[in-house]
Image: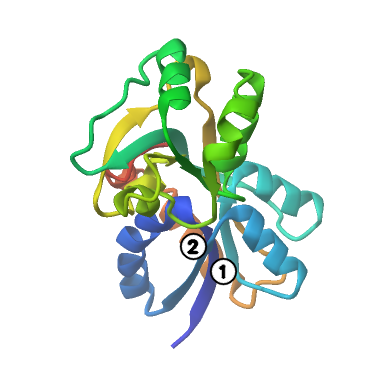
Amino acid sequence: MSGIKVLSTIGMRTVLEEVTPAFEQQNGTTVTRVYDSSIALMKRMATGETGDAAVFTAGAIDELIAQGKIATRTDLTRSFVGIAVRKGAPQPDVSTPEAFRNTMLAAKSIARSQTGASGLYFASLIARLGLADALNPKIIVQDGIVGRLAARGEAEIAVQQISELMQADGIDIVGPLPDELQNITVFSGGVFNNATAADLAKAYVRHLASPEFAAVIRLKGMEPA
């Protein structure tokens, strides 16, 4: 049986897990999925990791195009940064920039991802708001699904892509950042120029971009691109 290997950002994991089985069945193939942050996967590629297709942030795909590793970019979803707390815990107010600021200052601990797009954005956001000095001592930084830290009570608040927070059990998602502070990440697909099964990889990216999966994408906390 032929197969392809796809390197994918964690933010798209739930979508890929939902829509890939149909592709495998239709094409008599297997799709091996490798999940990590886009930045971590780019670093792994620099040390020899390979694949047939990538599902990364649009910026990372553009970087791969500039490096001559991918020819074209196909935008798939728009993802939003959100806030979560342990299941059943009081839900803080993040409805306005001022409420967000007060909630962050009042929190005893905050978790963010280390190399994920949401974690890097949150670090830049609190710096822009003049909160870095006050917040950095209580921020827990690690890769993976940081909502699990909130679920275990190790962090009062978790900040991450909503699609990633949804992958953690034992939390309540409070909601997205207020519009004025929101950062929209576009997740995109591309096929590596040295793919061993290029036609199959191209078909897989087209499959991910199919309008028929719009409802699935929304169910997973994102919007179709």
Residue 34 % position (x, y)? 51, 69
Q: Nearer the viewer, residue 201 or 222?
A: 222
How many other residues sit within 10 Å of disc 1, few (<14), some (14-19) or many (≥20)?
few
Residue 120 % position (x, y)? 62, 40
Quadrant assignment for the N terminus: bottom left
| Residue displayed at 39% across by 52% down | 149
Q: Nearer the viewer, residue 148 or 11?
A: 148
| Residue displayed at 58% across by 64% down | 53
> Label 1 vs label 2: CA separation?
6 Å
Residue at disc 1, secondary structure: helix
Residue 44 visible, this angle: yes
The answer to whether marks 1 and 2 mark residues whose Cβ atoms lie closer than 8 Å is yes
Q: Nearer the viewer, residue 1 or 59?
A: 59
Image quarter of residue 89? top left
As shown in the figure, which amino acid type bears the numbered disc 2?
Ala
- Render colour scheme: rainbow
| Residue displayed at 64% across by 59% down | 40
Residue 186 visible, this angle: no
Which residue was labeled with disc 2? 203
As shown in the figure, which amino acid type bears the numbered disc 1?
Asp
Which residue was labeled with disc 1? 199
